Image (spheres, grey):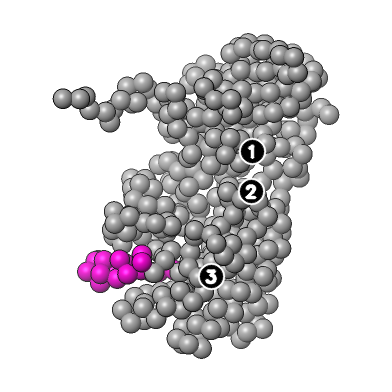
Amino acid sequence: MGNEKRLSLFPLSTAITGDGPDARLTIAGCNLEQLAESYDTPLYLYDQLTLDTAAAAYRQALADHYAGAGGVTYAGKAFLCTAAAQWVQRQDMMLDCTGAGEIHVARVAGVPRAQILVHGVNKSPVDLAAAVHHARVIVVDNLTELARLVPLLQNGPADRPELWLRVRPGIAVNTHAYRQTGQEDSKFGMGLAEASQAVAICQQEALAVTGIHFHQGSHFHDPEPIAPALETVLDLIVALRERHGWTPQVLSPGGGWGVAYHEDDLPHPVIGAYVAFIAHHLSAGCKQRNLPLPRLQLEPGRSLVAQAGVALYRVGAVKTTAARRWLMIDGGLADNPRPALYEARYSALPIQAPLRPNAGPTWFAGPFCESGDVLIEALPMPTMQAGELVAVPISGAYQLAMGSNYNGACKPAVLWLHEGKAQLIQRRETVEDLVARDLPLS
């Protein structure tokens, strides 16, 4: 198979300029070789056009398929920095922050309280205090957390956050076991009986509980398991109405809609079909139970940002063993642990003459002292030379956010690309940064 199909994995602004051996891969009109020379590699690129297009697709799908109010929350855990938070604000989305650290990033970026939502499965006292003072919504994970929140809210600012209750519907989506969150024995959320207790406590303490939240897992491609989970949650809402006279103003079925990481995964899952499925089943379920339509708040992270991101690596050496051809690249496990964690499959293209014929299966290995530091396995690639650049698409989500300084790796620079311009939004770490928190022994 030629490499043309892989181009659809890349950002929407991707193009090939020139012909034959002079052909070069470009993104947003930017010369990637020049960017690598200026900012070194590994180097991460984010394409604004792709981000804007995905955000518009969610807004349009909600408008087309849901008769009630709807909104989008960007999952900061997918990728968050000051510039990303500013983009979220400009898109008029909510920003999901997990804990005090991400709340701080949102505040530095100027995201107003009205757009900050806080998640977390075991929020610390510092996390809860930051949420009470800076968030519009706190998603409550458990009854212990709720008990800790009561005095903080009663003694806190006059502009109290709203509370949503996270429940376990008992049904997970079809994804890697490490990414499943909705099953009954999940560490996330409350059981259905606990949710009833939580509503009673909120009513007793005069707290503004306004929403129900659930999440079944991340990076799934089949929305079918959402239907029975919605049925379970809507039945819970009926029981809460009968028992406490309460119905939620907001229902959030989380997010987790998948993307295509590899050409074998193509075509890309359609955002509109995912939103339409949820909207149809929620509308029908509410009508059947005589429930008012709640605000439908979706929480996409990966499907907003993954395709916008590309990682650039430089080949340091080419090795040939008895059964494999290895490209030794200058990044891997430290900037993208997903293959090691989830057996995630990626694809790649050379920057120079990206559509030249493939020479056979190739393994991409990083420089780290782990046999599991293999970024890509058995991908058909052209003959490559040391010094060449390769681009790995679908690198925008859960890579840098989960990265590390393993083996003393310095986290890569990040550029924001738009209409022929590249803006540095995160500088490359230096070796001095690695010891900035250290103190010597006395």
Any part of residue 67 in sight = no
Q: Going from the N terminus, do you reach mark 2 or mark 3 first?
A: 2
Q: Position of residue 426 (x, y in %)?
A: 42, 32
Q: Residue at x 58, y 13 (%)?
A: 316
Determine the image quadrant of residue 314. top right
Element marked by disc 1: loop
Q: Closest to the observer: 391 or 206? A: 206
Residue at the spot of label 1: 343
Magenta run includes residue 163: yes
Task: Name the kind of residue labelled 1 in the image.
Answer: Glu
Position of the N terminus by quadrant: top right
Residue at the spot of label 2: 176
> In whole angstroms, how far apart are the C-alphas of marks 2 and 3?
25 Å
Q: Residue at x 54, y 20 (%)?
A: 367
- Above/below status of 75 relative to 64: above
Q: Position of residue 342 (x, y in %)?
A: 61, 41
The answer to whether 387 appears left or right of 193 in the picture is right
Label 2: few (<14), some (14–19) or many (≥20) C-alpha neighbours in 10 Å: some
Task: Name the kind of residue labelled 3 in the image.
Answer: Leu
Position of the C terminus by quadrant: top left
